[in-house]
Amino acid sequence: LHADESGLRVASKLHWLHIAATPTHTWYGVHAKRGMEAIIAHGILPNRLGVLVHDCWASYWTLDCIHALCNAHLLRELVYVQELTGQAWPEQMSKFLCQTNMLCEAVRQKGIVLSDADVAAFGTVYDRILREGERRNPEVTKPSGKRGRVKQSVAFNLLRRMRQNAEAVLRFVHDLTVPFSNNTGEQSVRMAKVKQKISGCFRTLEGAQHFCVIRTCLATLHKQGHGMLEAIRRALAGHPIVPASCSP
């Protein structure tokens, strides 16, 4: 299951569009909050058992499920850190992740699985690159007597996140059914962003909620092979196409 969220203007106030998507289903919801209050209110993600692919937003980590991080996000951050620092490890990590993804895709196409030794070898390379980055970007210690947290570098923060969440970063290696990125979730957001750019904000919350219901139905039917115009025509005629149910 892929999850994502994006800002949405409703009655001139910031709300959040929440998305949950699989290859065959898409769900949209709108809420005034971005975090757990919205997630609990919608009731979709808390009931999900299995793998959740996301972009490392803090609220997702509170959910009791198997986590997988979007590596497309990490690749963009690695490019930024490489340009910022001129260090070699971000490019090494980017190449490692991309090459590993290509290998996993080839293995998946052949219908086989990686051996435990292969998985361990990938983890070893990942750890080696992280250790080089950590050597080049040590933690800034707090001066004696100073209160509060010490600001760390962008590189250090990225390295710490990739270290703490190593298993989620490499989930696509441990489980070949897990995708490399959260593109399914991010693609679901794009149409709503285009709508907002062209039409501006929603005038009422009710209108935004109606939009979410309509987009949920149409996006899901499209994934299941139905034509959009035919789906709309039948809905207006009182004979809507009912999407196939989602597998548990």
Image: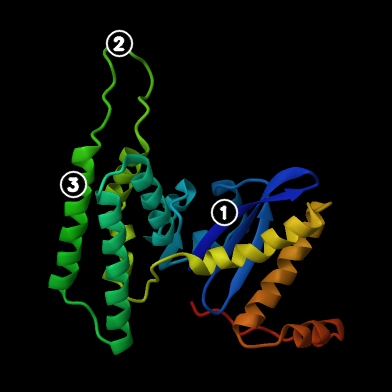
Horizontal relation, residue 244 to residue 3: left or right: right
Please tell me whether residue 53 is drawn above or below residue 176 in the rendered image: above
Q: Which residue is mark 2?
A: 145
Mark 3: amino acid: Arg
Q: Any mark on residue 183, and which?
A: none
**Residue 23 location (% of width, % of height):** 52, 77
Q: Rounded to the nearest whole Å, what is the CA distance between mark 1 and mark 2?
A: 40 Å
Q: Quadrant of residue 169?
A: bottom left
Q: Which residue is mark 1?
A: 39
Q: Which residue is mark 3?
A: 131
Image depth: mark 2 or mark 3 in front: 3
Mark 2: amino acid: Gly
Q: Is residue 232 visible?
A: yes
Kindly state the secondary structure of the residue where label 3 is placed.
helix
Count the marks.
3
Residue at the spot 75% in from the left edge and 85% down from the top edge: 231
Q: Residues within 10 Å of mark 2 (few under 14, many from 20)?
A: few
**Residue 99 location (% of width, % of height):** 28, 69
Q: Is residue 170 visible?
A: no
Q: Residues within 10 Å of mark 1 (few under 14, many from 20)?
A: some
The reply to whether the C-beta atoms of the residues labelled 2 and 3 are less than 8 Å apart is no
Kindly state the secondary structure of the residue where label 2 is placed.
loop
Residue at the spot 63% in from the left edge and 46% down from the top edge: 33
Kindly state the secondary structure of the residue where label 1 is placed.
helix
Residue at the spot 57% in from the left edge and 54% down from the top edge: 39
